Amino acid sequence: MDSITSLDKQYVAGTYGRFPVELVSGKGSILKDAAGKEYIDMGSGIGVTSFGIADDQWATAVANQALTLQHTSNLYYTQPCAELAQMLCQKTGMKKVFFSNSGAEANECAIKVARKYSAQKKGSQYYTIITLKNSFHGRTLTTLAATGQDHFHELFQPLTPGFAYAAANDVDGLKKLVAEVSAAGIMIECVQGEGGVQPLSQEFVSAAAKLAQENDIPLIIDEVQTGNGRTGALYCYMHFGITPDIVSTAKGLGGGLPIGATLMSEKVQDVLSAGDHGSTYGGNPVSCAGACTVIRRMDEDCLSSVREKSAYIFSALSGAPGIKNVTGMGLMIGIETERPAKTIVSECIEKGVLCLTAKTKVRLLPALNIPMEQLEKAVSVIKEVCAKKEDD
Ligand SMILES: *Cc1c(COP(=O)(O)O)cnc(C)c1O
């Protein structure tokens, strides 16, 4: 029989630089490869499996829903979709939810809502969405345009027009851009994830919210990576004391099945009407049943344990040999290392720990419920690998 790797290399499009690991199963924060070797999972997909691999509550809800009613189309009403929307609104104060299948789609919807709101309110020349340099908002041609990193844009021109980029944490620059362009929206990640796990400053987030409000420009918070408990609050914007008009999320919401959600505040809740937007799989009962078990568990106990584990990681790694700095919030952590991040990740794999990278950093996004003992073991491996010198 051909190995998983050789089949994949032959038949799967080469869009991913995969690590040489064939994963076959797991439980919680432990993954197993085809040879039976175990790994501690410090990435949870990319912040997707919020409560770990094959989590009992999640898997039971998903299996039961699959055995009951796996799909209906959006021509009919279904319980998991309605219940998830209610839970998201009650926990955030937002008023309406549109469900899709990914982060990029959640952002596409957010952009459509902001553009329609502004076109109706101010005129069709108000279409520009202001995003930030070093941001990441997705891979579709529109969310790629929203992404403020040139290297993603090369060779895919022309991208969707109508985006302008401000520098993160530059309040004056953002003010200037708002005055210059006919903005339909401001879209930010409170912690830039793919951009290297860089939190925005409180001053900048507050200023963005204030500018958006004063100029009646919908404020979109991209919570695809930061959302669903990841940073120690249900959504990261909650740490900053602001009220967004639109929140997009995905990744950890589904706990391992595809889902995207675009949450709309009172101001924009009725912008989209029948026929304006849609998605065949959007609000799929199986994905939503799984997501309900994720959001239901996001109580204060869960969030405070995320903050405690975060504090442990920061104190264990900050200032350790071979580590230049540690950034991030909650269980979304970036580590600037002296040796290349790719090398650190490869050596961690050999020692049975799976980590991620973000730009030049090692990135950690463990499951929110990773047991302390496994977290300590993984952190000690990461520490040991970071401390190594190139010629050791
Ligand atoms: C991952 C990510 C996206 C894209 O999500 P997909 O599900 O891959 O489409 C968008 N925004 C942010 C902040 C992300 O981290």
Image (tube, rainbow, N blue to C red):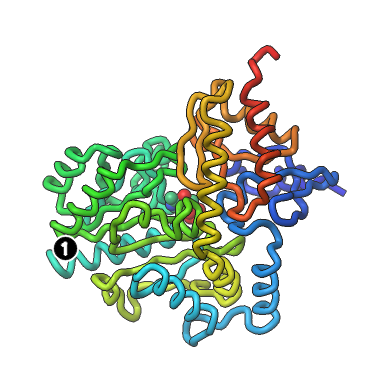
Camera sees residue 232? yes
Residue 168 as seen in the image, left or right of residue 61: left
Q: Can you see residue 138?
A: no
Nearer to me, 376 or 267? 376
Residue 211 image point, x, y percent: 17, 52
Seen from the viewer's position, the closer of residues 56 and 260 is 56
Q: Residues within 10 Å of mark 1 (few under 14, many from 20)?
A: some
Taking the image as shown, residue 106 lies to the left or right of residue 123, namely right
Q: Is residue 169 left or right of residue 356?
A: left
**Left or right side of 94 for 252:** right
Mark 1: which secondary structure?
Answer: loop
Name the spot of residue 378 as percent of width and height, x first.
68, 39
Mark count? 1
The residue depicted at 32 percent of the width and 63 percent of the height is: 246
Given the image, on which type of amino acid does mark 1 rest?
Ser
Residue at which label 1 appears: 124
- Asked if ligand 1 lies within 8 A of label 1, the reply is no
Which residue is painted at 41% across and 43% down in the image?
192
Question: In the current view of this chain or complex, which residue is farthest to the right?
Answer: 1
Q: Residue at x 29, y 57 (%)?
A: 242
- The C terminus: image quadrant: top right
Q: Position of residue 203 (x, y in %)?
A: 25, 43
226 in relation to 381, above or below: below
Q: Residue furthest top?
A: 391
In the picture as drawn, the residue positioned furthest to the bottom comes out as 76
- Percent x, y for residue 372? 66, 47
Q: What's the residue at 42%, 70% (across, down)?
A: 91
